[in-house]
Amino acid sequence: METNNKRVQYQAKYNYIEGNTVRKQSYVGQHAVRNNSIAPERHIRDIPRPERRITEPGRQIYRQPRYMTSISKSTLLVLTLAIAATLYFCIEFLMLQHQVSKMEKEIVSMERTLSTMMNENDAAYEQIKMAYDLDYVYNIAVNELGMVYPNNNEVITFERTDESYVRQYADIPK
């Protein structure tokens, strides 16, 4: 009976019924009428509130709120350690992030240096390649330096010794 009383009070207060076949309610007085039957009126009694004692203004005692009295020293220690650990990890994370950004900048500068060195290396390679190009050597010798091919009587041949190079101690014989 008590559960029905709570259900009627809830329905009268919130006017909400669950389900997909709910019928419209009609209201009589303060109570809802369901299925064309009037709910019996029940007297709802008020719960008396306890009286507060009024103390004199000079004699009031300061009491801490309940939420302040429930924390113990061990809980405070655990919270302090958790906050300290969080701060430590945040600082370490920021330091690592700074090191990563610093390394990225160094990588970019090293890549630029590598790029310029590769360009210089390619240019030097092309110059070396041109120096050993026989057509290029012939053009420089003939056009810029004015050299000509020797005649047959101007070429002197001699026999080579076992050494890999020739030392000239005197003039070449005619």
Image: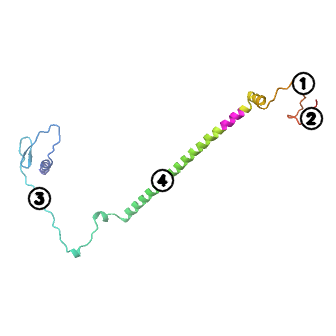
Where residue 21 sits: x, y (%)? 15, 37
**Secondary structure at numbered mark 2:** loop
Q: Is label 2 or label 3 in front? A: 2
* Residue matched to label 1: 153
Q: Amino acid at mark 3?
A: Asp
Mark 4: give few (<14), some (14-19) or many (20+) Cα within 10 Å. few
**Which residue lies under the disc numbered 3?**
46
- SS at mark 3? loop
N-terminal-most mark, 2 or 3:
3
Q: Which residue is mark 4?
A: 94
User: On the rendered structure, is 87 left or right of 106?
Assistant: left
Work out whether 96 lies above or below 161: below
Asked where in the image residue 151 lies, by quadrant, the reply is: top right
State the image coordinates of residue 68 (x, y, percent, origin top left): 31, 64
Query: Disc 2 vs disc 1: which is toward the camera?
Result: 1
Colour mapping: rainbow
Residue nearest the observer in this picture, 55 or 173: 173
